[in-house]
Image (cartoon, rainbow, N blue to C red):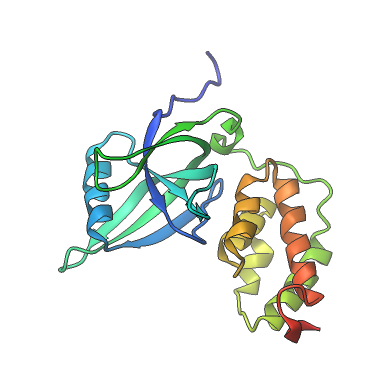
Amino acid sequence: MPGSLPALPGVVPLFPLPGAVLLPRTRLPLHIFEPRYLQMMEDVLRSGERLIGMIQPIGEGLANVGTAGRVTMFSEDDDGRMMISLRAVSRFRLDEVIEGFTPYLRGRVDWGGYAADRRTAEPDDPGFDRPAFMERLGRYMAAHSLSTDWNAAEEAGNELLINSLSMLLPLGVEEKQALIEAPTLAERRAILDGLMEYALHGGDDERLH
C-alpha cells in the first residue's frame, strides 16, 4: 500500500527507567552497566530491529505506554559497560509483560494509534504562543537554577523544543508519563506549559512563591 509503514515486532525488550522519556523524533543517550541490560544489548544488537522499549515504572508495575527506540550508536568501555544512543521509533501500548525467558523483561505491545510517530513531518500546533511560552520557560529555569542553550532553544522547531523539554526538565514520573501519553503535540505543549505555570505559582516548591 502506498505510504504504508514497515511492520514493527509484536514483542520488544523493555528497559524500565523512571524519568527516562523518549518522544517522537528525539534521541536518548543511555549508560548500560547492569548485567541483565548488558545481556539485553547483546540480544538487541543481534536482532534485525535493534529496538528497546523505554518504559517508566509506575507503582508496583509498569506504565501503560512507552516508546521504542532503535539503537543507532554504541560504544563499549574496557570494563564492559556500554554507552548507547536510541532514536525514537514509535510509542506503544503495553499489553502484557513477558517474564522468564530472558534476565530482562520483554513486552507484548500494540503500536496502534501511533503511526504519526513514525512519519517525518513535524505535526502542527497552530495555537502555540511561542513568545509567551519562552518567557515562562525562562522564569521556570531561573526559579529552578537551571541553565540551557538559549540560542539552540530559539532555533529549534516547535516539536523538537517541546519534546526535548519534556525529556529534560526535572519533572516527576507521573508528570513525565502524562507528557508521553499526550496524543498530539498541542496537548503535550499544553501539559508542559501548565506544569511550568503550576510550579511558578508554588505548586511544587514553596520557595517559588
Side of 5 where 124 appears, left or right: right
Between 75 and 166, the residue placed more toward the observer is 166
Between 59 and 11, the residue placed more toward the observer is 59
Q: As drawn, which residue projects farthest toward the top?
A: 1
Residue 88 vs 38, above or below: the answer is above
Q: As drawn, which residue projects farthest toward the front?
A: 60
Side of 6 where 199 appears, left or right: right
Which residue corresponds to the image point at 67% horizontal and 45% vertical from the top-left?
182
Q: Residue 180, how many percent across, how many down?
A: 60, 49
Q: As drawn, which residue projects farthest toward the bottom?
A: 207
Between 19 and 143, the residue placed more toward the observer is 19
Asked where in the image residue 151 lies, by quadrant, the reply is: bottom right
Side of 70 where 32 appears, left or right: left
| Label total for image | 0
Residue 155 vs 109, above or below: the answer is below
Q: Residue 113, how many percent across, how many down?
A: 61, 30
Asked where in the image residue 99 lies, by quadrant, the reply is: top left
Residue 13 vs 171, above or below: the answer is above
Please identify the quadrant where the C terminus is shown: bottom right
Asked where in the image residue 193 lies, by quadrant, the reply is: bottom right
Which residue corresponds to the image point at 60% horizontal and 74% vertical from the top-left?
149
Which residue corresponds to the image point at 24% horizontal and 38% vertical from the top-left?
101
Q: Residue 173, how many percent across, how many down?
A: 57, 60
